[in-house]
Image (cartoon, rainbow, N blue to C red):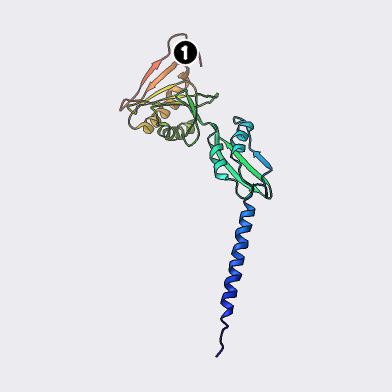
């Protein structure tokens, strides 16, 4: 029978304790701000609406500690609050670089002539407009509903070479669309996509040649539609 010496476990405990102390001391050393400090910040992105100086102002005050301890989440959170910023990536590059990459929002439509929404119907900026080709209108918080309806209607219209310029819904969920050629469509509350489908068939067969004379088409009738003609002198305008 082999007997183990009673001293070996004590030796192992001492060795483990020594390693733990070394690890703690190393960890404390690595947390010192003067050890592996962040000496360079890289800003990357196509800065069209977001000034790189604005990103720097949001980044620099949040750089504390060193390469290992800098709070990348704090930097990310602060840069994400900048208007027009869609996505932020913050990462470390050994041994001393903090890189901040920014992707700007892509405006999809104006909202109530007071701000801009992106393709996900998120209102990302208020009080700032661009020369957007598409305009949405509706009650507060209804951006997603309007954007979804736009997709359905535009899928029908584009097959016939038509496109929406604006789409509006009111508090009663009644819809009005304006085409790029200026024609206004009163769509009502029900069967909106079906009414658009009915319109394009009539438009292609009968109305296309007179489109510059027509102001609006009321499609809220169950078995037909009503035309509103432009006033004399307006018919020749596009």
Q: Quadrant of residue 216?
A: top left
In the rendered image of this protein, does residue 33 appear above or below residue 182?
A: below
Residue 192 visible within the image: yes
Residue at the top extreme, as displayed: 233
Residue 208 in picture, x, y percent from top left: 46, 23
Residue 117 in picture, x, y percent from top left: 49, 31
Secondary structure beneath label 1: loop
Residue 220 in picture, x, y percent from top left: 33, 25
Q: Residues within 10 Å of mark 1 (few under 14, many from 20)?
A: some
| 43 vs 34, nearest the viewer | 34
Residue 99 in picture, x, y percent from top left: 64, 43
Residue at (38% x, 16% y) in the render: 228
| 151 vs 37, nearest the viewer | 37
| Count of labels in the image | 1
| 35 vs 217, nearest the viewer | 35
Residue at the left extreme, as displayed: 222
Q: Quadrant of residue 177?
A: top left
Work out which quarter of the rendered image holds the N terminus and state it.
bottom right
Residue 162 visible within the image: no
| 102 vs 185, nearest the viewer | 102
Residue receiving disc 1 = 235
In the rendered image of this protein, does residue 206 appear above or below residue 31?
A: above
């Amino acid at each position: 029978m082999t007997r183990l010496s009673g001293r070996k476990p004590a030796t192992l405990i001492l060795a483990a304790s020594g390693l733990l102390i070394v690890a703690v001391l190393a960890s404390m050393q690595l947390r010192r701000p003067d050890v592996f400090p962040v000496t360079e910040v890289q800003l990357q992105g196509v800065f069209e609406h977001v000034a790189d100086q604005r990103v720097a102002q949001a980044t620099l005050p949040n750089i504390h500690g060193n390469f290992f301890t800098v709070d990348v989440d704090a930097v990310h959170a602060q840069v994400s609050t900048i208007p027009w910023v869609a996505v932020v990536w913050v990462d470390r590059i050994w041994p001393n670089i903090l890189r901040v990459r920014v992707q700007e929002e892509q405006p999809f439509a104006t909202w109530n002539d007071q701000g801009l929404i992106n393709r996900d119907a998120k209102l990302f900026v208020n009080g700032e407009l661009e020369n957007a080709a598409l305009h949405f209108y509706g009650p507060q918080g209804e951006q997603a509903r309007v954007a979804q309806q736009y997709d359905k209607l535009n899928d029908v219209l584009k097959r016939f070479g038509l496109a929406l310029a604006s789409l509006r819904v009111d508090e009663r969920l009644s819809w009005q669309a304006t085409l790029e050629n200026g024609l206004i469509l009163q769509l009502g509350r029900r069967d909106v996509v079906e009414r658009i489908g009915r319109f394009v068939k009539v438009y292609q067969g009968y109305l296309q040649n007179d489109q510059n004379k027509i102001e609006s088409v009321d499609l809220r009738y169950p078995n037909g539609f009503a035309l509103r003609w432009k006033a004399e002198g307006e018919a020749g305008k596009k």
